Amino acid sequence: MNDATTTVQELKSRVLAFAREREWEQFHAPKNLSMALAAEAAELMEHFLWATSEASREVVKDSAKRAKIAEELADIVIYSLEFANVSGLDVAAAIEAKMAANAKKYPVEKARGRADKYTEL
Amino acid sequence: MNDATTTVQELKSRVLAFAREREWEQFHAPKNLSMALAAEAAELMEHFLWATSEASREVVKDSAKRAKIAEELADIVIYSLEFANVSGLDVAAAIEAKMAANAKKYPVEKARGRADKYTEL
Amino acid sequence: MNDATTTVQELKSRVLAFAREREWEQFHAPKNLSMALAAEAAELMEHFLWATSEASREVVKDSAKRAKIAEELADIVIYSLEFANVSGLDVAAAIEAKMAANAKKYPVEKARGRADKYTEL
Amino acid sequence: MNDATTTVQELKSRVLAFAREREWEQFHAPKNLSMALAAEAAELMEHFLWATSEASREVVKDSAKRAKIAEELADIVIYSLEFANVSGLDVAAAIEAKMAANAKKYPVEKARGRADKYTEL
């Protein structure tokens, strides 16, 4: 599988099948999945705790660390997709809507080159 | 856009274009993106803090909350995709590899109906 | 040391001495400490991912898990105190101020027995 | 109240009284408190997302932001203490034990000036 040819639905279906086969849907309440997701996000973050932001660009190129980082990212997206599965949410539609809202909050001419929150632009 | 017809790459490209247009790549170091991702995961979790796991299945059906929850989920996936963009990672390939590893850790016959960690199965 | 006789300052001083001895103050920027704190909070949470809220009251009594849980909690408070050290914040004063604000947001007669956010009381 | 004269137990008792008065102990299962703690840790982190580590040392001096940061830190410690309350843990004892373990993992001569994990020293 690769990003160029794989739809979000194909990934969602795989993740759902994995959980169903193991009868894990009983544990996959939105509350529990949101916790698992946050826990995985923290594990990704742990790779970068003491590096500067600039140095973190090199950390992801380190071949030993890169494999671990890819695993943490996979875990995050897996839990995100399973959350969407159990909640009946369409991820692509949600992203499209959120990016349209973000585009209004952060118009190009105002936001260019600035990391400020939209309330401070 | 919807999950059935949208590839991961299409979403990645949208997210990257949004950041490039605003010259935000300078801020999008892996360290910073991992923090933003964890912060958004926490915002999703906040919707379920005091509900029981079972009750959280109803929270996601509440129409007012549902829209907010979809937004938080979108934010999480957006940052995940941007993390993949700046790190040059293929999300679908990483998920496929991780799920193959998980299938070995959690064989169906052992893991069925159990929430235990693989080290305790 | 125990909670009954140990002041917050005694703990802060211990934590600071540990970092200074190892010349770690260079790494202890508020950004990095806030990440480490969030990562430790996630590790604490991992003990309760798939348990119901009620069942989690038993998890903390399990003798094997209890020792690990105490360690995670210690890590969280250690990083909180070091954050206060490097930022020059007084934790007890901050807590007193925050609890006074919380008491206004959540008056006893309105908040009794309810988990709702103050904006919904 | 201030750190020099306030014991951990005094803070714990205040936090417990606040929860009891509102009959919130029913919501304060370890699972829920660990989530609330992680959510507050993420809020602290949000102040530093796009700043470099060095720049974050200035963020905490900014008078407008400083007050908010102190509030987030207070929330984290409040939830940590309430977690200790409901779990019957002694925070100072846990910190003393954890720091003794850390001192063995990170001996001064090996760890000086290095941010590496103990497994890599």
Image: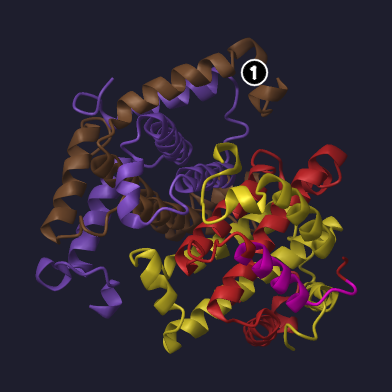
Chain colours: A purple, B brown, C red, D yellow
Where residue D87 sits in the image (x, y, percent)?
83, 56
B109 or C75, nearer to the observer: C75
Closer to us: B103 or B23: B23
Residue at the farthest top position:
B109
Residue at position x 64%, y 42% in the image: C49
| In magenta segment, residue D33 | no
Is residue B113 placed above or below D112 in the rendered structure? above
Quarter the N terminus of chain B occupies:
top left
Q: In the structure shown, which secondary structural element does the residue marked by tag 1 occupy? A: loop
- Depicted A61 relative to depicted A17: above or below: below
Residue C100 image position (x, y, % from top left): 68, 87
In screen coordinates, is A94 left or right of B105?
A: left
| Res. B91 in view | yes
Classify residue C93 by image quadrant. Answer: bottom right
Decide: is C116 above or below B89: below
Residue C117 spot, x, y in % from top left? 59, 71
Local packing at callout 1 (Cα closer than 10 Å; few below 14, some 14-19, many 20+) is some
- Residue in the image at 62% along x and 34% along y: A27
Q: Is residue B52 among the parts visible in the rendering?
A: no
Q: How many marks?
A: 1
Pick the front one: D52 or A111: D52
Q: Residue at x 25, y 53 (%)?
A: A97
Say which amino acid is labelled 1: Arg
Which corner quadrant of the image does residue C94 belong to? bottom right
Q: Main secondary structure of the magenta part?
A: helix
Q: Chain of mark 1?
A: B
**Image quadrant where residue D112 sits:** bottom right
Quarter occupied by the C terminus of chain B: top right
Residue at 66%, 38% (x, y): give it: C50
Residues shaded magenta: C4-20
In the rendered image, residue A103, in percent from the top left (x then y), is placed at 18, 62
Q: Which residue is mark 1?
A: B112
